[in-house]
Image (tube, rainbow, N blue to C red):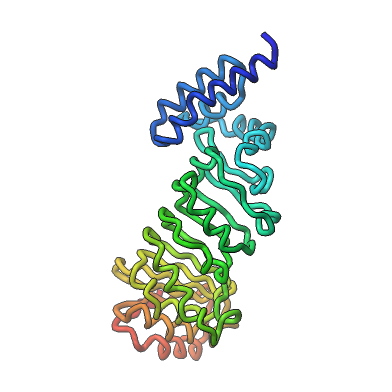
């Protein structure tokens, strides 16, 4: 049987089964039927599906298949994706990283291959209102997580309906301080209908206050804020101790004091304070004073 004939049969099999998989992505049985048929014509995608659906997958073989074929398997996603970076699960793309050229292009309509994508990494690219409209396309309804979104551009994101986890790259304050945008950037994000988890990277202390005093703060189940690699703040309103703050660099003790004060905006019921390096008695006392507005403090 000729190679051209096998390629034609593979295309026919994909055309028959992929719409059913996209319509019901959790039905693994449909994927396995397609994988069987692909294996019959020697298509390596069939092997990848079988391996990734296995209870004990051969990871080495999976890596070998991806190393050899990932570029061809990415092609249906179009030119917006950074080559070789797509993550596959059960044989289909689930996580992509946008290419640098995506910021300057008017994005073409996403094809059906995007139906299996659950996560988009924007790699801190700038974008426009056009990209926000692109995110509203029905083929992107499965996207539940977006990573490395510049917070300034997040205001143009629109309302992708199923995004539940959003990673933003700040800081907000230095770019927007004193402007109307500074006051409403988090409030705009509160309009995302299913957002429950916010991750804010490279934040400043002022960003803690902006977030804590926004409508978004009362909506989310979890907020993670990372302050320039010097401190972290995690807010989980439903937890017994809803706020946890960690000092990463002892040289940032002054900024961390201000973080503890700003964190009161999320509520003052209970706080857990951690530090990664030994602090002297004076520094500990400074932190105790900064945390005095909380009803209970766990010094972990």
Provide residue 298's location: percent of width, then percent of height.
35, 76
Residue 2 vertical placement versus 237 (above, below): above
- Quadrant assignment for the N terminus: top right
Between residues 7 and 57, which one lies in front from this camera angle? 7
Residue 79 vertical placement versus 218 (above, below): above
The answer to whether 152 appears left or right of 72 in the picture is: left
Residue 48, by quadrant, is top right
Residue at left offset 58%, top offset 55%: 121
Q: How many marks?
A: 0
Provide residue 139's location: percent of width, then percent of height.
49, 44
Q: Residue furthest top?
A: 1
Provide residue 143's location: percent of width, then percent of height.
47, 50
Provide residue 176's location: percent of width, then percent of height.
57, 80
Between residues 184 and 281, which one lies in front from this camera angle? 184
Between residues 59 and 70, which one lies in front from this camera angle? 70
Residue at left offset 55%, top offset 75%: 203
Residue 74, by quadrant, is top right
Residue 93 vertical placement versus 175 (above, below): above
The answer to whether 62 appears left or right of 50 in the picture is: right
Residue 116 vertical placement versus 208 (above, below): above
Residue at left offset 40%, top offset 74%: 300
Residue at left offset 63%, top offset 58%: 123
The answer to whether 232 appears left or right of 197 in the picture is: right
């Amino acid at each position: 049987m000729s190679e051209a004939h096998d390629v034609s049969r593979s295309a026919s099999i994909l055309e028959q089964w992929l719409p059913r998989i996209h319509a019901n992505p959790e039905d693994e049985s449909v994927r396995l039927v397609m994988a069987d048929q692909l294996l019959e014509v020697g298509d390596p995608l069939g092997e990848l599906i079988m391996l990734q659906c296995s209870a004990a997958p051969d990871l080495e073989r999976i890596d070998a298949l991806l190393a050899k074929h990932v570029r061809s398997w990415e092609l249906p996603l179009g030119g917006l994706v950074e080559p070789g970076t797509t993550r596959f699960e059960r044989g289909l793309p689930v996580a992509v990283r946008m290419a640098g050229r995506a910021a300057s292009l008017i994005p073409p309509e996403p094809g059906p291959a995007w139906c299996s994508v659950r996560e988009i990494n924007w790699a801190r690219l700038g974008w426009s209102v056009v990209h926000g409209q692109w995110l509203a396309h029905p083929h992107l309804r499965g996207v539940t997580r977006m990573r490395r979104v510049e917070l300034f551009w997040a205001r143009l994101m629109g309302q992708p309906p199923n995004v539940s986890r959003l990673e933003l790259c700040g800081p907000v304050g230095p770019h927007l301080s004193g402007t109307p945008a500074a006051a409403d950037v988090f409030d705009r994000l509160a309009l995302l209908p299913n957002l429950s988890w916010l991750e804010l990277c490279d934040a400043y202390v002022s960003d803690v206050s902006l977030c804590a005093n926004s409508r978004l703060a009362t909506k989310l189940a979890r907020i993670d804020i990372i302050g320039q690699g010097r401190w972290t703040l995690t807010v989980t309103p439903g937890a017994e101790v809803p706020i946890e703050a960690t000092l990463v660099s002892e040289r940032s003790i002054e900024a961390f004091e201000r973080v503890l004060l700003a964190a009161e905006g999320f509520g003052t019921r209970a706080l857990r304070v951690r530090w990664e390096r030994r602090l002297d008695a004076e520094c500990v006392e400074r932190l105790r004073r900064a945390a005095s507005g909380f009803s209970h403090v766990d010094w972990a």
